[in-house]
Image: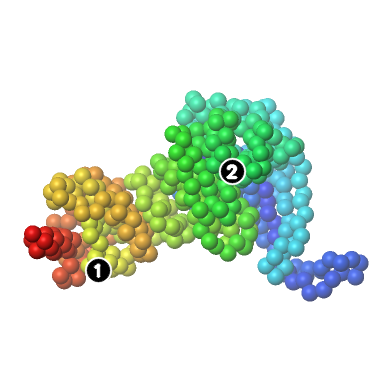
Amino acid sequence: MSKIVVIGDIILDEYLEGNATRLAPEGAFPIVNIVDKYDRVGGAGNVALNCHSFGAAVTLFVHTDPDDTVYSRIRSLLPDNRFVVKHISSGRTIPVKTRIVSHGKIISRYDNEITSYISSNECREVIQEIRAIRPDAVIVSDYAKGVVSQDLLDQLVTLSKTVGYKLFIDPKPSNRHLLNYCGAYLLTPNIYEARLLIPRSLDNSSPAELVVRLKNELELEVGLITLGEKGIIAIDRDDTYIYTSAHPVEVYDVTGAGDTVIAYLATSISSGSSLKDAVESANYYAGLSVKHFGTYNPSNLVINSKNDSTKLVSRERLIDLLAGVREQGSSVVMTNGCFDVLHQGHLHFLKECSQLGDYLVIAINSDNSIRRLKGNERPFFDSGHRKALLAELAYVDYIVEFEEDTPRELIELVRPDVLVKGSEYTPEKIVGAELANEVRTIELVEGYSSTRIIDRIKCILSRAYSNAQ
């Protein structure tokens, strides 16, 4: 489980919802009869909630006193488990953005905020706390409300080199607030913000040109720009481009989409995911976010409906995800196999497996593992192909590869509620049976096996070759 620190501007998003059926006599504006009132956590708080939803242990620095009346409303919306709040004692209050909503649309907003910058003493206090926590990642969520200062940024960059965490920054550049974000692991600006961050950049510069300059001129390990409905573009430390287009969705509200992106990137990368996988999945979750009204925190249940690429996980990431699954009281079903030539028998077996619990995990043999078990002519398809096909199945949740001859080590890590194999196995011959709460076998569809299908293909090819002679 990755440890993530979030610091930045926390915002209370207040919603007043009602019906507007007439205009005011004193002017051309609607009269709204308020029927509901609710709060959401915005800014750095929303980033922290997203990180928590993605399975991280979170420490959130709050720029107000514990007895602040606005903070008390926010605290009621924060979880207790895997979530620590640390206060930067300052006497400042949290900004409140009040939105008036009628018929599902925001018709007006008014803000109540005072911008006051973090002091040098408060900055030292934060740095000491982070040094003691030794997180895997630190996220700076800058909304230009005063918490993020140049002094704080400089010290966070310096500390990242000694403690070893990755520094992720969601910048807020403007003519009035243009900080030096140099030295971070990555930033998450949109295209407009990227142009403000890069001196002498032209409005007609392409995203590919801008992301290279962003990485080089700000001395980042990774260059990244969010492109809204066009997706995300990134360039890694080896100058390899990564581009993922946005999934077509009906955009309802873009509030908090950037929070979701940086939260997933930090949680995923600090847990060992590749940059490519993290970018693709962050893009997917941003698409989920804009389909919802207000700030949106994908729960672990929503993670189950992710895109195909996020089903492919490392064993470390799998353990983190399953910890969140079990916190909900959900059960884990596990099976394993080569799945070399996917066929109807596999589909029947896996669908039956999925009905034995809430989450289905497939442990799949690596190419080398299959060669040792079945000979050098196998696998027929490499692991990338096999995993991609399994990821297309809606009833499969996570796929993890193992190099060993058996999945015993992986089963010991997962400790599934239900371990499943085909009916050709007796319980005493199932590897890792003693590590599961329950062992089940499922009747196979007669006449289907990868080996039999491959032998038939070989036979057909052999006849065709003979006839050609």
Q: Nearer the viewer, residue 461 or 25?
A: 461
Residue 424, position as x, y percentages in the image: 14, 64
Q: Which residue appears at 73% of the width and 58% of the height?
A: 99
> Is residue 66 shown above or below 450?
above
Q: Is residue 361 visible to us here?
A: no
- What residue sits right under mark 1 in the picture? 344
> Is residue 396 shown above or below 240?
below
Q: Which residue appears at 15% of the width and 50% of the height?
A: 377
Furthest residue toward bottom:
21
* Count of picture labels: 2
Dividing the image into 4 quarters, which one contains the C terminus? bottom left
Q: Secondary structure at mark 2?
A: loop
Q: Nearer the viewer, mark 2 or mark 1?
A: 2
Q: Quadrant of residue 157?
A: top right
Residue contact between numbered discs 2 and 1, judged by CB atoms under 8 Å? no
* Left or right: residue 279 compared with residue 394: right
Residue 373, position as x, y percentages in the image: 14, 49
Residue 248, position as x, y percentages in the image: 53, 61
Q: Which residue appears at 74% of the width and 71% of the height?
A: 19
* Left or right: residue 154 compared with residue 270: right
Res 165 label: none
Q: Secondary structure at mark 1?
A: helix
Q: Which residue appears at 49% of the width and 25% of the height?
A: 162
Q: Quadrant of residue 114?
A: top right
Q: Nearer the viewer, residue 386 or 185?
A: 386
Amino acid tagged 2: Ser
Q: Nearer the viewer, residue 41 or 467?
A: 467
- What residue sits right under mark 2 in the picture? 206
Amino acid tagged 1: Gln
